[in-house]
Amino acid sequence: MGNNQKPAVATEQGALAVRKLTFWEAALIIVGANIGSGILGLAYSIRKAGWPILLLWLIIAGVCTTASMLYVAETTLRTKKPMQLPGLAERYVGKLGAVLVFISVCANSIGCMIAYTNGSGNILSQLLGISRPMGSLLFTIPAVLVVWFGLKATGIAEKFISTGMIILLAVIIGFSFISGKADLSRAIYTNWTYAVPVFNVAIFCYIAQYAVPELARGLRHDPMSLPKAVIIGMTITGVLLALVPLAVISLTGAENVTEVATLAWGQALGSWALYAANLFAICAMMSSYWAVGGSMLTNIVDMFKFKNEHDTKTRLIAIACVGLPPFILAYSGLIGFVDAIYLAGTFGGVIMSILPALMVNSARKNGDMEPDWKCGWYASKSVQAVIIILFCAAACYAVFDLLGFLPSAW
C-alpha cells in the first residue's frame, strides 16, 4: 500500500480541470450515481425470481464491479494528465478501445437518463396532477443545471442530497418492518428459471465505473483516498440495494409490486409514505442524473478533444447531447422503465468488464509513474478472466431473451 506520506502527484492540466473533492464528497458521488432508477426497478424485476437470488447477484456483481472500478482507479493514478475513460482507453488500449468505451458510456448514461426521465414523469404526474412530460421537464431542468456547473457543484450537491436520501430511506425501510404489515416470507422464495436476467439488472445498479476518473480528478491531492472512497461508496450502495426490494416485496407481495417501487410503498403504508418514498425516488434519480450526466459530459469533451470543458460553446454542445436524447427517447414509446435499466446494464457491463482489465494491464507497463497504491490479488489474470466471462455470459442471455428463446424475468 506504500508509505503513509501523501505523494506529490505531478499533473498535466488538460481540457478537464482539476477541482478538489473531499473523501465523503467522492464516496457519496458513487452512492448518488448508483442509487438511481435501478433501485426503484429492482423489486419489480425480481418479482418472479425472489429476493435471495437478488442478494446473491448483488454480492457477486458488487464484488466484480468494485474490482473493475479499482482497475480504473489504478490506471488513473499511473497517468499524469486527467482523462476520462475514452482518453484512458485510447492511451492504454488504442483507438478502438476509446470508441468502445465511449459507446458504452453513452449507451449506459442515456439508458439511465431515459429511466430517470420516465420515472420522474410518472411520479410528479401522480403527486402534482400534471402531465408526464411536464413532470419530466420539472425534473430535467434543475438536473441539467447542476451538471452545467461541473464537478465541484456535483460533489457538494451529492453530499447533501445523498445524505438526506439515505436518512429518508432508512426511515421508510424501518417503518416498513415495524408497521406490522410486512411479512418476510413474501420475499424469501426462489425461482431459478428467472435468475439470470436479475444479474443484468444488478450490474446496472452498480453503474459508477464511469465516475471513477471524475473522482480521481477530484482526489489528485490525496490519491490514497481514491480506493477507499470507491469501496465505501460501493458498500453503502450494496446495503441499500438489498434492503429496498426486501422491504417493498415484504409489504406488498410479488403480485402487487409496481414498476416504480415507491408507488407500491405508498399504497401499502399510506399517503405519508407515498410522499416520503417518492421524494426519495426523485432525490435518487436527481443525484444519479448529476453523476451520470456529468460523467457523460466530460467523456464527450475528452473523446472529441475539445480544448476546454468550461468553454461556453463546448459546454452548450455537450449539455445538449446529455439532456435532449434521453427526453426524446423517453417519450418515443420505444423503451420502458425497467427495459431501459436492463439493456443499459447488460451491454454497458460487457465493455466495462473487458476494458478496465486491459487498461490496468497496459498502464502497469506503459504508465507515467508508479503510484503509492495498487490493486491487489483481485487484479490477477485469473480474476480478470472470471469477471469478463461472467459479464459476457449475462449479455448472451440478454440477447436470447430479447429474441424470445429464454424466459424473461418480468
Image (cartoon, helix red, strand yellow):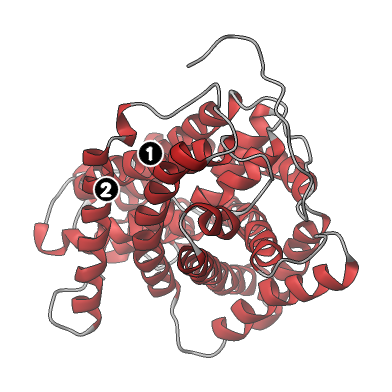
Residue at which label 2 appears: 387
**Residue 381: percent from left, percent from top:** 26, 40
- Is residue 48 or residue 341 the one in the foreground? 341
Quarter of the image for residue 326 reads: bottom right
> How many discs appear?
2
Of callouts 1 and 2, the N-terminal one? 1
In the image: residue 310, left or right of residue 378: right
**Residue 239: percent from left, percent from top:** 40, 36
Q: Residue at x 63, y 57 (%)?
A: 295
Badges 1 and 2: C-beta atoms under 8 Å apart? yes
Quarter of the image for residue 90 reads: bottom right
Q: Is residue 334 above or below residue 227?
A: below
| Amino acid type at image mark 1 | Ala
- Is residue 363 or residue 352 the one in the foreground? 363
In the image: residue 258, left or right of residue 90: left
| Amino acid type at image mark 2 | Ile
Badge 1 crowding class, 10 Å Cα cut-off, few under 14, some 14 to 19, many 20 or more, is many
Badge 2 crowding class, 10 Å Cα cut-off, few under 14, some 14 to 19, many 20 or more, is many
Q: Residue at x 62, y 85 (%)?
A: 328
Q: Is residue 138 above or below residue 172?
A: below
Find residue 67 and name its label: 1
Q: Residue at x 44, y 48 (%)?
A: 359
Tell me the quadrant of the picture where the C terminus can be found: bottom left
Local SS, label 2: helix
**Residue 376: percent from left, percent from top:** 36, 26
